[in-house]
Amino acid sequence: MLWLLLFIIILGIIGYLRLSLITATWMVGGWLFITALTNSLHGWVWFVWLPILLILTLINIPSLRQKLISQPAMRLLKASLPKISRTEQEALDGGNVWWDAELFSGKPNWKRLRDLSSSSLTQEEQEFIDGPVNTLCEMLDDWEITHVRQDLPPEVWDFIKKQRFLGMIIPKEYGGLGFSALAHSQVVMKVSGRSITAAVTIMVPNSLGPGELLMKYGSEEHKDYYLPRLAIGKEIPCFALTGPEAGSDAGSIPDVGIVCKQNFNGKKDVLGIRLNWEKRYITLGPVATLLGLAFQLYDPDNLLTEEVFSSKAVFDDIERTGDHIGITVALIPTDTDGIDIGKRHFTLNNPFQNGPNWGKDVFIPMDWLIGGVDNVGKGWRMLVECLGEGRGISLPALSTGAAKLASRYIGAYARVRKQFGLSIGQFEGIEEPLADMLGNAYLMDAARKLTTTALDQGQRPAVITALLKYQLTERMRKITNDAMDIQGGSGICLGPSNIIGRGYQAIPVAITVEGANILTRSLIVFGQGAIRCHPYLLTEMKATQENDLVALDNALFSHIGFVMSNLSRSIWFGLSNATFEAPGTPLTRRYYRSLTRLSASFALLSDYALLTLGGNLKRKERLSGRFADILSNMYLCSATLKHFEDQGEPEADLPLLHYACQKTMHDAQQAMLAVFYNLPFRFVAKTLRALIFPFGKPYAPPSDKLIHEVAKLALSPSSTRDRLTEGCYITDDPNDRAGRIEHAFNLAIKTEVIERKFKKLVKSRRLKARIHTERIDEAVDKKLISSDEGKQLLANWTAMREAIRVDDFTEEEFKRG
């Protein structure tokens, strides 16, 4: 039994440390040698010793293991693994892996994350945010935009164009601002707090728009002509991707382009494309002068011969299926004959320019394709690569802006709004949603900053940008719903004073665009992440498709070692709660340990699901969604730890750190338990659960005490409150719809002592008046409070009444609409 125990310990050390095959062979071989040398091979020990010797021999002779194991495995994989389609392969090739791969590894390299130099704004970027962005925010009257004009005012459009808001991502040599991803994010975040319409108007040209496609794939001629015009708003771009029959499934675009020859602009037999399409939900479409268009290209007459392309290599790279070339992208002036554009959709009372467009027999020459004829059939890859940055910057920035402002202003509202003689923020029922708002805002900002840092350093983490868009827009939805619950009646009555209503109406827009969240969660995050981020799976799939036995053999046995390692680590972490892992600082170490434990369990469970379900996992969307939730929450928790350390570990922010980390770890744990309940082979799944969580659920949600501590941060001024809402447009102007609440909040804090004094007077029945303002006057007349104190109380009461004001309208105003 001692020899057997020693063998188990050796296996555990090999798995925990992920030792190489050579080192592991020497260690196990040493055990075999010593047991034989000490004459310990009696009875049942032979039944352990001999199989181990055979296995050790087998795995160390490549030719033998290839014949006996890898070759049968290849046949099995060919039968069970789905073939990767061209569009799936292009999606996998678009972008790369980054921290998501570390979380998939079961052994994250925390030094890599903690040593990462976070992005910061340049002086020029900060000056732009403090100058033109601030000015734009001051110009925005959301009620006028959404109710009166149904559009931005002309002077706002002119300012946006003049200040090159539409050219933030365009390099300076083409007249743009050349901003970093962080600066781009900061601008959108700040503007979104004042007007969703203005934010969306700025977002689109700087995310998935012709500008980014031109910079990455455009010809020099196109860049030199269009980029300067796009930078100053002389051209307004839109990109037509979504259609009635191809929404989230953009790879199934039904719109068609036929290669043909036609007279064009006085020239005969110009090689080009005859297009027919129908698109909808196209932001900026109604005002666009330049249309980016994605369509399926066909060449029935074989006009795309080798002579048309820049080289034979480019021609040979074109993948035809009959006469089908593939998805292609063009850049078309909207005044081209045959284009019908200009109508608008009514987007839930958030009237950014959005509408359908059509094309009937529209002829374009080949040089109108982005990148010219050399890029025919490459549109899907181009789109996938450009979608990633838009998902990772624009919508997360908008969501974080909404979260920060709701946390600040709804917290202020909860401080000044009173019921039963108390600020409603002091009620436990209000504390719970208020704390959740602040905790979510904190981790959302952390994830936003970490992702923009990755983008600024040249990473293109497609899985992370997808999960970020999904998670942050969903958390914005939760925060806005909580804000509506706290604000109550004043939140449901639209008008110039309502600070939350239009944002509430806009939530489905953010949830839907750039990949609907249901699709992103159930298909993309884990569906692509399992293949992209797994250290061996994609190699195994490619080796199987290419009949490369050597490559499969190497990947397969590395994969087996990977699984055994994660099993060893999961068992040990389950017993020790990863106590002997030591990344982080004394304030953060326990969360790093817990994430390390979750990572090992996640990697093990992923492999179990892949092994037992194979290609069917692709169709298990609910299971895939739960895996996506585990990965997403681990990423958000990682970002939160990084954010806290980057800010110098302020002790005052600890409640936010604890709340965000405990919430995400608990959510990851619950998603993992839901995975256990739905895996095949129930006995094995239950055994795995017992090994991973031997003492039950290790992670609890935030306690009531912690909820109270976090909620308090919203109810009084502090450096933590300011850090949490850094980068937003903050005003205490009593004439501003949001500023009036901040103004009332500041006065409430200033008069807190006087209010307590006055409240005691009322309770003592020394004042006979029954109306609040008359009581103040009576207290002054009786010299129970000073005249100055009376003025402060009256100013505070007046500000409070303004802060909770609800708009109303006459019947005639309703009829005018």
Image (spheres, rainbow, N blue to C red):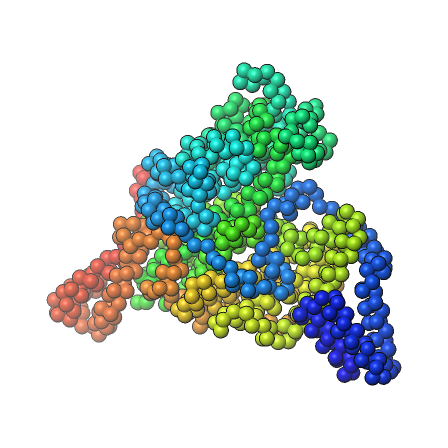
User: Which residue is located at x 67 percent, y 29 percent?
Assistant: 298
User: Which residue is located at x 73 percent, y 31 percent?
Assistant: 322
Q: From the viewer's perspective, is residue 756 above or below residue 131?
A: below
Q: How far from the left and from the top, in percent, is residue 291?
A: 51, 32
Q: Is there any visible trace of residue 493 in the rendered image? A: no
Query: Which is more toward the observer, 77 or 511?
Result: 77
Q: How far from the left and from the top, in percent, is residue 357?
A: 52, 31
Please identify the quarter of the rendering in which residue 412 is found.
bottom left
Please identify the quarter of the rendering in which residue 768 is found.
bottom left
User: Which residue is located at x 52 percent, y 36 percent?
Assistant: 214
Q: Quadrant of the N terminus?
A: bottom right
Q: How far from the left and from the top, in percent, is residue 800?
A: 27, 58
Q: Quadrant of the C terminus?
A: top left
User: Which residue is located at x 45 percent, y 57 percent?
Assistant: 445
Q: From the viewer's perspective, is residue 255 above or below residue 101?
A: above
Q: From the viewer's perspective, is residue 346 above or below residue 466?
A: above
- 433 sits left or right of 691 in the view: left
Q: How far from the left and from the top, in percent, is residue 490?
A: 36, 53
Query: Which is more toward the observer, 121 or 288?
Result: 121
Query: Which is more toward the observer, 102 or 35?
Result: 35
